[in-house]
């Protein structure tokens, strides 16, 4: 099963599947043999399409996806939906995507339910409807699909399509976070920090921010930096705050850049940063509280070294 999708609930028992990026060229010949031997088996055509797709042979992949989709195979319907959704310069493609997602979603395919919900939320190919978005997000979340849980949590947090309910949002974010959803960790941290729908805890907020940051959520770096700067949920540490702000700013976070600038503007904090940088051997200038180019370069070197 060199091209089986690990998210496909219709895989045979014991078949774990292969992530799209991990499919190699050997899968094509194996899947072609299976599709030739079992021409009426939609899964064989779907997996051949997936192998071809992974190798960049898009047109051939489409033919195989269509063969499987014509037999009602829900994973193939979903894959076709994503292809049409992602094509540019053709408004009608959104309509095609929504129809394909709907056909798959009605068969209980969680990724299709989530994507259909997203189209309703954004009004792409379907009339904009928060209520419909919530309906489809909930169906996918109920199947343990983390993206569905996160988006449904967002709808509850913002009161879109449902009455605003921070406690429900926290529960859903927690479900998604336990499955590794970085932005869910970040949003859960915000709820902990503000005591919204959940007992306030700066310590737990920081834990969630740091977990999210490890998974690449840039905003979480900035949030964690604030906590270190202010000593909330952790011992105050302006050096750690500066490192986090600088790391986030280097990745394009404007809020982090602004907070870092304010941090450097405080002479007391600037002196403390200079003292620590000198102690670690990265700065040999004056401890004067003027955090100029030399001090900032030293901080940059310290961040790279750490």
Image (cartoon, rainbow, N blue to C red):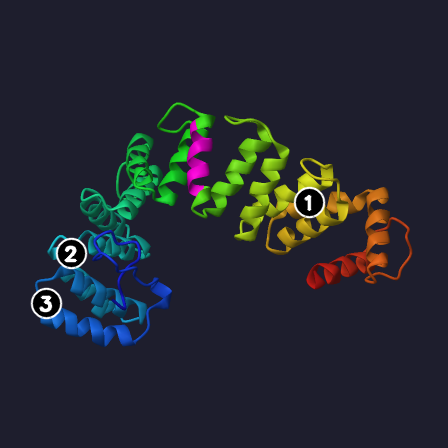
Q: Residue at 50%, 26% (x, y): give it.
A: 197
How would you rate the neighbour count of disc 2 (Cα within 10 Å): few for under 14, some for 14-19, many for 20 or more? many
Q: Secondary structure at mark 3?
A: loop
Instruction: Return the residue at label 2.
Output: 69
Q: Which residues are magenta?
A: 168-176
Residue sticking out furthest to the front: 14
How would you classify the magenta stretch by its main secondary structure? helix
Q: Is residue 213 above or below residue 159?
A: below
Instruction: Return the residue at label 1.
Output: 258
Residue 263 magenta-drawn? no
| Residue 139 position by quadrant | top left
Q: Residue at 10%, 67% (x, y): give it.
A: 38
Q: Is residue 52 left or right of residue 304?
A: left
Q: Earlier in the sequence, mark 3 or mark 2?
A: 3
Residue sticking out furthest to the top: 163
Q: Secondary structure at mark 2?
A: helix
In this view, the residue in front, 185 or 219, is 185
In this view, the residue in front, 193 or 96, is 193
Query: Given contact means CB atoms under 8 Å apart, are the residues at marks 3 and 1 in contact?
Result: no
- The Cα atoms of the two marked residues, 1 and 2, are separated by 51 Å
Which quadrant of the figure contains the C terminus?
bottom right
Instruction: Return the residue at label 3.
Output: 38
Query: Given contact means CB atoms under 8 Å apart, are the residues at marks 1 and 2 in contact?
Result: no
| Residue 53 position by quadrant | bottom left
How would you rate the neighbour count of disc 1 (Cα within 10 Å): few for under 14, some for 14-19, many for 20 or more? few
């Amino acid at each position: 099963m060199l091209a089986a999708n690990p998210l496909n609930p219709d895989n045979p028992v014991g078949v774990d599947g292969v992530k799209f990026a991990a499919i190699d060229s050997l899968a094509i010949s194996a899947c072609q043999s299976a599709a030739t031997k079992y021409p009426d088996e939609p899964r064989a055509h779907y997996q051949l399409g997936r192998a071809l797709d992974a190798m960049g042979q898009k047109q051939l992949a489409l033919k195989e996806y269509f063969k499987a989709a014509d037999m009602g195979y829900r994973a193939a319907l979903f894959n076709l939906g994503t292809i049409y959704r992602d094509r540019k310069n053709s408004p009608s493609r959104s309509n095609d995507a929504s129809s394909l997602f709907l056909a798959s979603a009605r068969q209980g395919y969680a990724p299709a339910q989530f994507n259909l919900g997203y189209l309703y939320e954004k009004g792409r190919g379907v009339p904009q409807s928060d209520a419909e978005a919530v309906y489809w997000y909930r169906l996918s979340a109920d199947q343990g699909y983390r993206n569905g849980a996160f988006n449904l949590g967002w709808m509850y947090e913002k009161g879109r399509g449902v009455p605003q309910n921070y406690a429900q949002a926290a529960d859903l974010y927690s479900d998604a976070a336990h499955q590794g959803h970085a932005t869910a960790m970040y949003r859960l941290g915000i709820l902990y920090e503000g005591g919204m729908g959940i007992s306030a805890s700066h310590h737990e907020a920081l834990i969630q921010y740091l977990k999210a940051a490890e998974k690449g959520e840039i905003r979480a770096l900035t949030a964690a930096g604030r906590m270190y700067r202010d000593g909330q949920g952790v011992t105050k540490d302006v050096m750690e705050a500066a490192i986090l702000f600088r790391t986030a700013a280097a990745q394009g976070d404007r809020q982090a850049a602004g907070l870092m600038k304010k941090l450097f503007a405080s002479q007391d904090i600037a002196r403390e940063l200079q003292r620590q940088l000198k102690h670690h051997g990265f700065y040999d200038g004056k401890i004067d509280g003027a955090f100029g180019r030399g001090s900032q370069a030293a901080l940059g070197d310290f961040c790279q070294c750490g």
